[in-house]
Amino acid sequence: MALSLVGLKVTLFFSFLVEALLFGLLPFFLANKLKATTRDRFLGISNAFAAGLFLSAGFIHLLGETHQILSEELPGTLPTALFLSSFGFLCTFFFEKVFFANYHSHGDAQEKVPLTKGEGGSYGTTPHTDSQGDNNHSNSASHPWVPYMLMIVLSAHSIISGIAIGVQSNIDGTIPLAIAILTHKWIEAIAVGVSLVRMELGRRFFLLISIYAIMEPLGVVGGSVLTLFVPRNATLIIEGIAGAIASGTFIYVATIDIMMEEFSKSRDKYLKTLFCILGYGLMTALVFAVPHEHDEDTHAFSLVQ
């Protein structure tokens, strides 16, 4: 491996880390400066925007790419990517609604944990009751596993895209993929930050953002190591399978855990609809405007074949 390529990957390692941390923490500091009522509206609208991003990431970005990869690497009549995506959706659904159903809060749904402690100006919350007609929904904070599931989903996506960088053997193939990741990483990080702030996790917010931020760099390292032991087509198949399952969980988190939560409240429904569509459109536009993270990989491998 050329030294210049190693230097580029090291640079990308830190670039991915810093970008995810900066933009992932941004919603916390923005929300911390707002008054309680303004903050709640800001987070609700921003969360709807994040749902649109996640929905596009699941359907168009991940499912679209993995369908292309698996169709080429595992040809046959079975639509493997579609099957794995729906499998991921169902697993997440049963995980929440069946296996962890007893962990959902009922009588204490009005209790919320402050993000920071302190008087005046601190990001704290008080017991909250929605207006009439809005108190029949379950708050995402009452599902203790949800933030961790969100991290698993997003971490899987980040590791997969990081591996796509790590397995590159030349600069010409690395740069387009790096542009693709850097172009949408910032907006994905903002969406992650908004969703986690909305869940009111206290200090766990910073831990989960840090975990999310380090996953892409770790994927770069893992992909570089993987090339030493695993054939290129096997790497593509592994990425495709993981990405397809992750797409189903992305879709679940966007629709069930975010959209159903936000749109169960009557307040700002039309504004949330607008921002959800904007989020979906923006992520979709980015997917089509920049190179796909595996296009160069798949093309290069086909040439070797």
Image (cartoon, grey):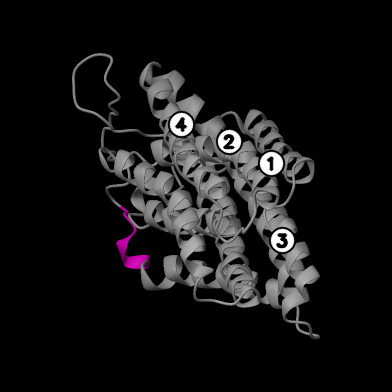
Query: At 67% across and 76% down in the image, what residue appears?
Result: 83
| Three-letter code, disc 1 | Met
Badge 1 element: helix
Region in magenta: 101-106
Residue 121 vertical position relative to residue 237 in the rendered view, above or below: above
Q: Earlier in the sequence, mark 3 or mark 1?
A: 3
Asked if disc 2 and disc 4 are in contact, CB closer than 8 Å, the reply is no
Separation of residues labelled 3 and 1 (CA atoms)? 14 Å
Separation of disc 2 and disc 4 at Cα? 32 Å
Q: Residues within 10 Å of mark 1 (few under 14, many from 20)?
A: many
Residue at 38% of width from left, 42% of height from top? 209
What distance separates the C-alpha of mark 3 from that of mark 4? 43 Å
Label whose residue precedes the other's in the sequence (4 or 1): 4
- How far from the left and from the top, in percent, is residue 100? 36, 67
| SS at badge 4 | loop
Residue 188, by quadrant, is top right
Amino acid type at mark 4? Ser
Q: Which residue is mark 3?
A: 65
Query: Would you say residue 250 sits in the magenta stretch?
Result: no
Residue beneath the point at 70% across and 45% down: 176
The quadrant the C terminus occupies is bottom right
Q: Going from the N terminus, do you reach mark 2 or mark 3 first? A: 3
Q: CA distance from mark 1 to mark 2?
A: 8 Å
Q: CA distance from mark 4 to mark 1?
A: 33 Å
Q: Residues within 10 Å of mark 2 (few under 14, many from 20)?
A: many
Q: Amino acid at mark 3?
A: Glu
